[in-house]
Amino acid sequence: MRLTVFWQRMAEHFGQGYADTFARDHVMSELGGRTVHEALDAGWDAKEVWQVVCAVMDVPREKR
């Protein structure tokens, strides 16, 4: 998954304004105690990060 697609999906689910705030502030144990930004910066694949976000935040299956 390209980062542009990842950020599109984040914006579609959380809203344009909240997606970055969530990605910057929400620490998830499933990402090794990292935020989305930290996980991506640490080299996690965008698709893996999106799958974690979907699981943690109950993103509907049709949006995954």
Image (cartoon, grey):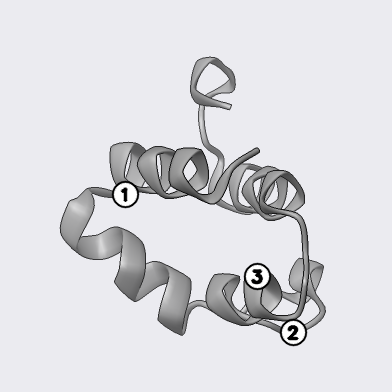
Few, some or many C-alpha atoms within 10 Å of disc 2 (few <14, some 14-19, many ≥20)? few
Q: What is the quadrant of the C terminus in the image?
A: top right
Residue at image x 56%, y 40%?
A: 58
Give the residue type that dot 1 points to: Phe
Give the residue type that dot 3 points to: Leu
Few, some or many C-alpha atoms within 10 Å of disc 1 (few <14, some 14-19, many ≥20)? some
Q: Nearer the viewer, mark 3 or mark 1?
A: 3
Residue annotated with mark 3: 40
Tag shown at residue 14? 1
Residue at image x 65%, y 79%?
A: 41
Where is residue 32? Give x, y as percent: 82, 79
**Residue 19's image quarter?**
bottom left
Q: Earlier in the sequence, mark 3 or mark 1?
A: 1
In this picture, residue 21 sits left or right of residue 62: left
Residue at image x 65%, y 38%?
A: 1
Find the residue positioned furthest to the left.
17
